Amino acid sequence: MNSPFSHSLTMPVGTTLDRYIMQRQLAFAYATGELSQLLRDLALAAKIVHREVNRAGLIDLTGGMGLQNVQGESQQKLDVVADIRFRRALTNGGEVCALISEEEEDIIYTGNNQGKYVVAIDPLDGSSNIDVNVSIGTIFSIYRRVTPIGTAPTVEDFLQGGHEQVAAGYILYGSSTILVYTTGHSVDGFTYDNSLGEFILSHPDIKTPTDGAIYSCNDGNVDTYEPAIQTYLTMCRRKEYTARYIGSLVADFHRNLLKGGIYLYPPTSKNPDGKLRLLYECYPLAFLAERAGGKAITSSGSVLDVQPQYLHQRAPLYIGAPSMMNELTQLLRA
Ligand code: AFP
């Protein structure tokens, strides 16, 4: 029967994140639904943070707290709000026994010792961009705990290594808000529809281009990079690649993932071990990049192979399209 309504009024809205998670869960015979619930908890907090980011200038949420976080960086009000929102969602959800956050020095215990999972999270990355309306993001990494269920989680649960991640993802609060995650299979992106209050599947099975022509690094630090990196960057300029650097890792990573490019944060004189944090920046993005066909290395080889020593460990990060990464790797090995 012909609909009396115009096509646009009756078009399907697409697959919601909730439905997608449920469909994926049904595809795994022994899935119990706990990871699905955890992902939904993260999505709920993401919606709240999306709301706060969008009205930050109207509700006194811009500017600093006048405090420093564990990294010695000045905390913005939205850093603290995002930290509280994600922590509360994961605590109330019941699946997570503990988390670590960029904003807190120690393990955060949720009190749910029956929870099977731990989460490492950077609640609001790129926070120096908050006050100037530039894209910012959340990055998360999920592990199944290794300590016995019912006991108090320990640092051991977080120092398992990048290959043990069961899921990883990010939320980019940009020109639109998008949640991208993988459980180790496809990498899928869901754009937030404000009018429905739902994340809708918009970027199924993301594959990064094999080659790329974008390079992203902080040009102000280049003189302090090691010679191989400087040579690589000279090559990028000779090839007339495009330089793009937002200064929000999630935004730079997302652009390069979709368009093809390389992101570099090498050791610098100020940050001799690199600036980015292994557990909640490098590991999750490396997991996503590899599942999307890209590569991620640090000074010693694959990011995911690094054995972590402590919670807020830093690491150099080079991540992006495979052919660009191969060229860089050759120079680093020479
Ligand atoms: P902030 O959260 O302090 O802005 O740091 C953001 C970040 O960790 C990452 O998102 C950026 O890619 C990187 O630092 C930018 O660092 P530089 O300002 O040194 O380029």
Image (cartoon, helix red, strand yellow):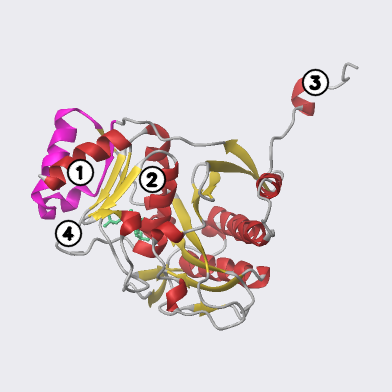
In terms of sequence position, does the residue under pointer 1 or pointer 2 come before the other?
A: 2
Please state which amino acid type lies under the numbered disc 1.
Answer: Thr
- Tell me if mark 4 has few (under 14), some (14-19) or many (20+) residues whose alpha carbon lies within 10 angstroms of its own: some
Distance from label 2 to label 4 (Cα)?
20 Å
Q: Which residue lies furthest to the top in this view?
A: 2
- Image point (59%, 42%), residue name: 191
Examine the image and state in which quarter residue 8 appears: top right
According to the picture, the residue beneath numbered tag 1 turns out to be: 329
Task: Decide: few, some or many residues near mark 2? Use Cα within 10 Å; few <14, some 14-19, many ≥20.
Answer: many
Q: Residue 268 carries which label?
A: 4
User: CA gap, disc 3 to disc 2?
Assistant: 39 Å
- Residue extent of the magenta highlight: 213-241
Q: For marks 1 and 3, give the CA distance.
A: 54 Å
Q: What residue is rendered at 52% in x and 79% in y?
A: 153
In the rendered structure, which disc, 3 or 2, sits on the residue that comes first in sequence? 3
Residue 167 at x, y = what percent?
A: 52, 55
Q: Do the residues labelled 1 and 2 touch (CB within 8 Å)?
A: no
Which residue corresponds to mark 3?
A: 6
Q: Where is residue 107 in the image (x, y as percent from the top left)?
A: 47, 78
Nearer to the camera, 29 or 324 = 29
Q: Position of residue 298 (x, y in %)?
A: 26, 54
Frontmost of labels 1 and 4 is 1
In the picture, which quadrant includes the C terminus? top left
Q: Identify the residue at the far bottom of this view.
A: 152
Q: Dot 3: within a 10 Å radius of its alpha carbon, few (fewer than 14), some, or many (20 or more) residues?
A: few
Report which quarter residue 331 is drawn in.
top left
CA–CA distance between discs 1 and 2?
Answer: 19 Å
Earlier sequence position, callout 1 versus callout 3: 3
- Indicate if the residue with disc 4 has its beta carbon within 8 Å of ligand 1: yes
Query: Marks 3 and 4, Cα distance to the nearest angstrom?
Result: 58 Å
| Mark closer to the chain start, 1 or 4 | 4
